[in-house]
Image (tube, rainbow, N blue to C red):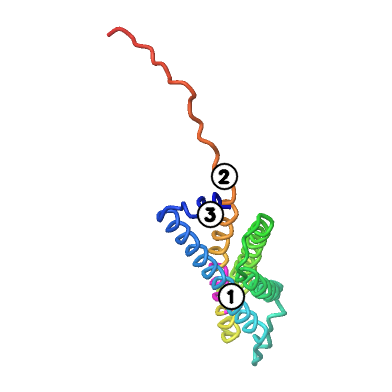
Amino acid sequence: MEKTNVVEGSRSPMQMKMGDELEGNTNTLRTAETFLRLLPVALCVSALVLMLKNSQQNQYGSVDYTDLGAFKYLVHANGICAGYSLFSAVIAAMPRPSTMPRAWTFFLLDQVLTYIVLAAGAVSTEVLYLAENGNTATTWSSACGSFGRFCNKVTASITITFVAVLCYVLLSLISSYKLFTKYDAPAACRPTSPIEVAAFPG
């Protein structure tokens, strides 16, 4: 019993300082991760609501986001993003040790969500570009000149979506770091014996 106490009390001040710094870095990383997971909730919900309420009717006709599959995909992607972000933020905020299955789960889901939201934003951007500029090859004229308010809301929704993508890029880096730091670095390949160099006469 006395031996155990001696071992526990034999930690040097440097070791204690390093332990405190490591714990502080862990808490800082958890706080940053939780914030980055909560931020997309507001962003994705804002982009979703903007698109859901986006419709316009005038003398040229009527247009609604449901008329285009890309915009419907954007709504669904933002809804999934908001739900996952809220759930993962609650899990990340819990002061639990990060296990290997948990690290792998966050890593894979963060990657999947990043590509889902990125694809939704990219496809919607392409459709918006065609709506603004038209396509002379297919005699498709610009629609934003007639439905400007509709296009403005689409632009705002897509912009917010790409901000959420940026958050998930950062989250993917954090989850990658937390996962791969659990693995030991490969041993350096060092020669077991000194290398002999032949000497040639000058």
Residue on which disc 2 sits: 184
- Report, in whole angstroms, how far the alpha carbon at label 1 lies from the one at label 2: 31 Å
- Report, in whole angstroms, how far the alpha carbon at label 3 lies from the one at label 2: 30 Å
15 inside magenta stretch? no
Which residue of the protein is positioned furthest toward the top in this rendering?
Answer: 201
| SS for callout 1 | helix
Q: Label 2 sits on what residue type?
A: Asp
Q: Residue at x 46, y 61 (%)?
A: 20
Label 1 crowd (10 A; few <14 / some 14-19 / many >=20):
many
Q: Label 1 sits on what residue type?
A: Leu
Q: Position of residue 117 (x, y in %)?
A: 63, 68
Please report the bounds of the magenta region as a residue range: 157-166
Residue on which disc 3 sits: 5
User: CB atoms at circles 1 and 2 under 8 Å apart?
Assistant: no
- Report, in whole angstroms, how far the alpha carbon at label 1 lies from the one at label 3: 44 Å
Q: Which mark is residue 38?
A: 1
